[in-house]
Image (cartoon, grey):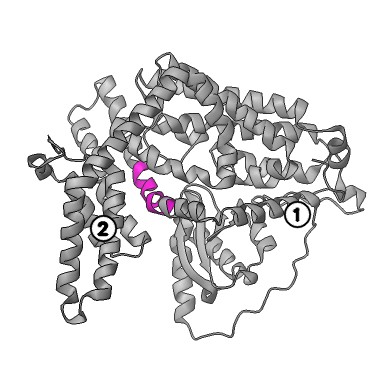
Amino acid sequence: MADSKNRATAAAILPLVGGASNITSVAHCMTRLRLGLADRALVDEDALKALPDVMGVVDDETYQIVLGPGKVARVTPEFETLVEEGKAAAPAPPAATPEPHAVTADELAAQGAELRAARKAKNATPFKLFLRRIANIFVPLIPALIGCGIIAGINGLLINLHWLPGVTPALAAIASGFMALIAVFVGHNTAKEFGGTPILGGAVAAIIVYAGVANIEAFGQKLSPGQGGVLGALGAAVLATYIEKWCRKWVPEAVDVLVTPTLTVLVSGLVTIFGLMFVAGEISTGIGTAANWLLDNTGAFAGLVLGGLFLPLVMLGLHQALIPIHTTLIEQQGYTVLLPVLAMAGAGQVGCAIAVFKRLKHNKSIRTTIKSALPAGFLGVGEPLIYGVSLPLGRPFITACVGGAAGGAFVGFFSMIGDKVGSTAIGPSGWALFPLLDGNKGLGTTVAIYGAGLLVGYIVGFVATYFFGFSKQMLVDLNVDTQAAAGESPSPAPAGTTEPTEPKEPAKV
């Protein structure tokens, strides 16, 4: 039954993105179906947003359809199957540009679309494109990080309760196996992303975790297995890719199959052993030391800044730079102390949305959007609320950041007094982060601090938005029932709609 429902969702999406012939690539992350499209003009975006299972869309380097955690992992295989079936069928005439879709256009939705377009244009800088490539390396690892993180949490609980002592060693092995070899997966994905042979990237990165490196001395000291971690693996695989490309250019085709992989692994392997492992190890240690010092000594202030600025960082695409840092901290310490602080930004966003719902009592379209998007917001999926509500309105986006800053300061304060709150994986936030929490003072204390931080974010985001999120003119413009004013009979928006129906007059932001 579930499979047929997921296939129906995939079948509903496919024609709205131009059909199988318009799809050049299919992938997914934690919440989004990411599509490469030959012609984006063939996308019927309004109809796509109206599908019950679609929480929103993001027009970026790839066309991204927000389906939510869990759902996207089930819909993607069905979508890939439909695309393959469509391409295998007899060639069909090129899909016609869809006719205009009759929708109730509004100023807020238009502003949201303009802001997304502006953000996309600003993100097309070389630095931000580089950050996207880094994200593409680590995002495919998130499901394994989450699964192993939850198993590690269950195992820790069983050990503390002295339950099933014969099972806990097996759970420990299951939870730790992936992290022990994460450098190999990073190397594989890095080579793939930078245009090399993935298995060669993985082979070079495997040197870092090989136990035999303990017999090698570099820079006056013995190497240790895992030294350099994911950063060393990333550097080694990038180097291997460039060496491979050089070999493909100069090595004769007759001996390419023998010479190219040999030189690639040999040269990049030697550089990794006698250079990259030591350098990357020092950088990794520095990252761990800096993160701990920041929260130990300036916890409340650091949390205030990190929690308050995370939503703007997401808008600018700069949050992707944090992914290798999170992964390095998880590899070193077992958890990242930064993610729970940053997750407070989502709490501020939820509190903000509830305040908008309360203030705009007569605007049924915005209230319908908020009602449909809030459950996802509580689970850490913030795009529908950000692009459909707070960001286009302007002021509420700022007050949402204030809520995030308050929650971040709360969690940071407890870190400063010695109660660290961390996450064993990256990706989830909000309530979805609870199963992945870990810390230095026991699970009960860790959960209590994180939960209280969310509550602080909700309350401050709500209060700041309720009292400071609207000017008098904004309330006049927005707090009306546009359907009644236009003489239309109100009709509820589809469950997955994330673009609100706006007043005809532009909001004074």
- Viewed as shown, does residue 282 lie left or right of 507? left
- Return the residue nearer the eye: 381 or 334: 334
- Viewed as shown, does residue 220 lie left or right of 58? left
Image mark count:
2
Q: Residue furthest front?
A: 219
Residue 44 visible in the current orientation: yes
Quarter of the image where one finds residue 350:
top right
Type of the residue with mark 2: Gly
The tag on residue 201 is 2
Q: Estimate the x, y position of residue 139 in percent, counting from the top left.
A: 41, 50
Type of the residue with mark 1: Ala
Q: Tag 1's secondary structure?
A: helix
Q: Do the CB atoms of the residues marked 2 and 1 lie less than 8 Å apart?
A: no
Q: Residues within 10 Å of mark 2 (few under 14, many from 20)?
A: many
Residue 180 visible in the current orientation: no
The residue at which mark 1 appears reads as 110
